[in-house]
Image (cartoon, grey):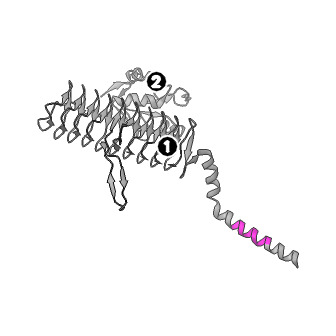
């Protein structure tokens, strides 16, 4: 796709400084920017690349001083990251609808909307509902009475179990499992375990994106809930009866134990672990590898470490911790001096 800088500026509501007729055929990382590409500068450390690369245009903040680059072309925007997100939509690869494959198995009682694509070797079981403009790629499974909302894309190899619900305009990436049994067992007197049936569902609201290889367990009773606009990275486990709030983002390899309630607009770093039956307030931030063992009542706080403590407290504690060997040496030296002083005073 080849387009002028001026046209791209209209798309992202930006202002052109330089040649608006420059032709762009691809986006690129700023370190690799060459003629014909458009790149962006969102952090100060990347500013030197403007002089050392030859992109046809750069998307930059309206706060950047451009006087040092008179021969370059820029698109000035208020929010660089938001503009890049809009721009990349035009270049992102999309699955294209091909109708229902002759190798798909669709139960006659399933309800299939208009302009739906169902790939080869996908199974749609009885009573399932698929909305308009849905793409379900090959080798997927949609269980009995499950529901997929309009405009949703389900990538290859994903499984949606019986009665689970997926909202409109969602994206489910490959090999994700939605609705597997929650981890529920009753320990018997002889030490064995009896399985507790998991009779609830998983419900995913609109505009949710779930990465590859995730597992979202169905509720024991009721529902496991992923609210509108939440974004989950790859390889995340969400246990039974968990609730994840609106516009919360979760990085890879996070585990959330059963019945925990995550608030709206939270940010959870990679490999964090959250124990069960907690309540996490809106706007909470967990740094990567944090282990959360207690509820968070105050909104907008940051946490770090295992077990997690408040972020600034952690940084102060770590500053002491990393110096413990030297502090221990000094302590031993002081103990020896005190003993010598005691010995001299007794003499």
Q: Position of residue 51 (x, y in %)?
A: 49, 36
Q: Position of residue 212 (x, y in %)?
A: 33, 43
Magenta: predominant secondary structure element? helix
Question: Does the image show residue 162?
Answer: yes
- The residue closer to the viewer here, 344 or 147, is 147
For this orientation, the residue located farthest to the bottom is 347
**Residue pointed to by mark 1:** 278
Q: Residues within 10 Å of mark 1 (few under 14, many from 20)?
A: many
Select label 1 or label 2 by which is in front.
1
Q: Quadrant of residue 136?
A: top left
Against 212, residue 152 (above or below) is: above
Indicate which disc residue 18 carries: 2
- The residue closer to the viewer here, 241 or 185, is 185
Residue pictured at 48% horizontal, 39% vertical: 267
For this orientation, the residue located farthest to the front is 189
Write down the region rendered in magenta: 329-338
């Amino acid at each position: 796709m080849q387009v002028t800088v001026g046209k791209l500026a209209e798309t992202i509501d930006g202002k052109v400084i330089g040649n608006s007729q420059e032709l762009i055929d691809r986006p690129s990382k700023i370190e690799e920017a060459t003629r014909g590409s458009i790149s962006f500068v969102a952090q100060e450390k990347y500013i030197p690349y403007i002089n050392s690369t030859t992109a046809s245009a750069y998307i930059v903040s309206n706060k950047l001083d451009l006087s040092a680059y008179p021969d370059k072309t820029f698109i000035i925007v208020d929010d660089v990251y938001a503009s890049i997100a809009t721009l990349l939509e035009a270049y992102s690869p999309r699955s294209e609808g091909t109708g229902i494959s002759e190798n798909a198995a669709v139960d006659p009682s399933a309800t299939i909307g208009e302009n739906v694509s169902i790939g080869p070797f996908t199974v749609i079981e009885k009573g399932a509902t698929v909305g308009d403009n849905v793409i379900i790629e090959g080798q997927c499974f949609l269980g009995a009475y499950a529901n997929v909302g309009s405009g949703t894309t389900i990538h290859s190899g994903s499984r949606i179990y019986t009665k689970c619900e997926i909202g409109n305009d969602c994206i489910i990436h490959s090999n994700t499992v939605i609705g597997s049994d929650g981890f529920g067992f009753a320990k018997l007197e002889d030490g064995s375990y009896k399985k507790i049936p998991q009779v609830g569902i998983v419900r995913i609201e609109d505009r949710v994106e779930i990465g590859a290889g995730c597992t979202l367990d169905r509720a024991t009773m009721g529902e496991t809930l992923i609210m509108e606009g939440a974004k989950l990275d790859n390889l995340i486990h969400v246990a039974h009866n968990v609730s994840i709030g609106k516009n919360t983002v979760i990085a890879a390899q996070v585990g959330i134990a059963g019945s925990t309630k995550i608030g709206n607009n939270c940010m959870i770093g990679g490999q964090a672990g959250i124990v069960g039956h907690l309540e996490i307030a809106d706007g909470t931030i967990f740094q990567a590898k944090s282990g959360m063992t207690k509820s968070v009542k105050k909104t907008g706080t940051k946490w770090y470490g295992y077990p997690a403590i408040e972020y600034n407290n952690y940084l102060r504690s770590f500053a002491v911790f990393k110096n413990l060997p030297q502090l221990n040496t000094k302590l031993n030296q002081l103990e020896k001096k005190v003993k010598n002083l005691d010995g001299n005073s007794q003499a």
